[in-house]
Amino acid sequence: MSGDEELGCGEGGEMLKSGDKLFAVSSGEYSDYRVVGIFSTQEKAQKFLNAVRKITDYDSFNDLEEYTLDKGITEIK
């Protein structure tokens, strides 16, 4: 798979590509760690994080995590 190959739908319906950034919201730590949501933009992830922090008593939501799609993978056969 080349770095320019399309992988799935992203923001506004365009296709995601290797190297695109994804933003995760997680909570907990160690054995209680879990990903709560994955978003196509930092703004959407932050909006979600702000909303869940307002409506829940659970204060263990972590800061946003940024990931690069297919980071380190040069070719899949």
Image (cartoon, rainbow, N blue to C red):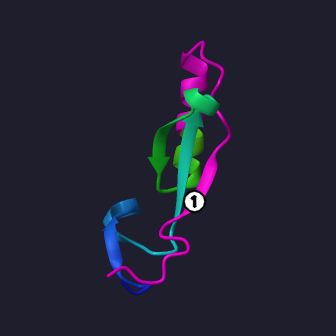
* Majority secondary structure of magenta residues: loop
Q: Is residue 1 magenta?
A: no
> Which residue position is annotated with label 1?
67
> x and y percent of residue 1 in the render?
36, 84
Residue positioned 48% across, 83% down in the render: 74
Locate residue 48 relative to residue 64 in the image: left or right.
left
**Splitting the image into 4 quarters, where does residue 10 fall?**
bottom left
Locate residue 66 relative to residue 48 in the image: left or right.
right
Locate residue 19 relative to residue 60 in the image: left or right.
left
Question: Which residue is nearer to you in this view: 56 or 76?
Answer: 76
Residue positioned 37% across, 79% down in the render: 76
Total label count?
Answer: 1
Above or below, comparing residue 38 to residue 34 in the picture: below
Question: Which residue is nearer to you in this view: 47 or 70?
Answer: 70
**Splitting the image into 4 quarters, where does residue 53 fall?**
top right
Above or below, comparing residue 48 to residue 8 in the picture: above
Question: Which residue is nearer to you in this view: 73 or 11?
Answer: 73
Question: Which residue is nearer to you in this view: 75 or 20?
Answer: 75
Above or below, comparing residue 75 to residue 10 in the picture: below
> x and y percent of residue 75 in the render?
42, 83
> x and y percent of residue 70 in the render?
48, 70
Provide the secondary structure element on which disc 1 rests.
strand
Above or below, comparing residue 16 to residue 43 in the picture: below
Is the C terminus in the top left, top right, bottom left or bottom right quadrant? bottom left
> x and y percent of residue 48 in the render?
52, 36
Disc 1 residue type? Tyr
What segment is highlighted magenta in the picture? 48-77
Q: Is residue 52 magenta?
A: yes
